[in-house]
Image: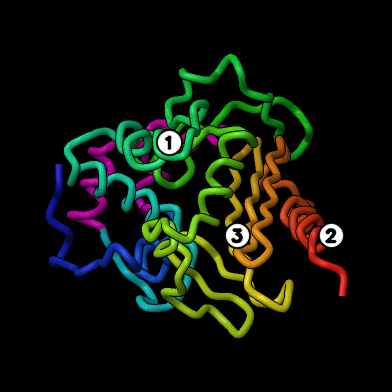
Amino acid sequence: MITPIKNNTPISFISLSNHTSGLPGIPSNLKLTKVDPDNPYKNYHEKELVDYLTDSLELSNKGKYAYSNLAVGLLGYTLSEIDNTTYESLLHEKIFSKYNMKKSTSVFGNVKDDLVVGLNTAGKETPNWEFTVLAGAGGILSNVEDLSNFAIAQFDSSNKVLELTRKKTFEINDDLEIGLGWHILKSQSDHPWHSHMGGTGGYTSSIIIDEITKNGIIVLSNVSAYNPNVVNVEKMGFELMKSLLPSE
């Protein structure tokens, strides 16, 4: 269902995608559900999201960048509702089928037997996070082959849809901008790179692309997003990308 928002507060699709909507990182009523710390989104369903949007929605610092899982989760939910389909079907129609991403899905059961075990901060096995209504925040399960196909598609100059996602929609600071999901890094090279990093309780991932050299780096790890050294996952990606730059 598409639900009325508290006080008819206007929120644009762009602001959800570039994290300037003013929404908090997670909805305030998430902690009121039966939260499993090892699988925090599992019991947060459409009813809870609708209740939050109609009764508890509060925006803070609208127009300023603040990364929000709620924002991108709401974006995925809303686009699915507009198309009257599931988030999984939307992904297959708009992305997976177009870019030969045959192993990618947002349904845990489809690939559970193929997954590398996720590890918590102590290096112990931890469950996969299962997303329901907020699947847009981190529900996609994929592999290097599929993500390589997605990265290569970014270098097709005739693909104006993907090109649009990489265009700047907001300047975060002198060294960092954001498009539609993509972060645009201006400090790692003499030309911008596009990147996105993701993480859950048992995994961290990073994708970096260089439109000029047409190189891409994908790092998929079973290092927890809460690991104190998790920044090294993305750092490794940057170092690998730098190693591919042409010698002067």
Q: Is residue 177 left or right of residue 15?
A: right
Structural distance between the alpha carbons of marks 2 and 3: 16 Å
The secondary element bearing badge 3 is classed as strand
Identity of the residue drawn at 43% across and 36% down: 96
Mark in the foreground, 1 or 3: 1
| Residue 164 rendering spot, x and y as whole percentages | 40, 64
Q: Indicate which disc residue 96 carries.
A: 1
The secondary element bearing badge 2 is classed as helix
Residue at numbered disc 2:
243
Direction top: furthest residue: 113
Residue at numbered disc 3:
195
**Relative to 183, residue 121 above or below:** above
Q: Indicate which disc residue 177 carries.
A: none
Q: Nearer the viewer, residue 96 or 87?
A: 96
The secondary element bearing badge 1 is classed as helix
Identity, as a three-letter code, of the amino acid under mark 2? Ser
Q: Earlier in the sequence, mark 1 or mark 2?
A: 1
Count of numbered tags: 3
Find the magenta span and give its range: 27-56
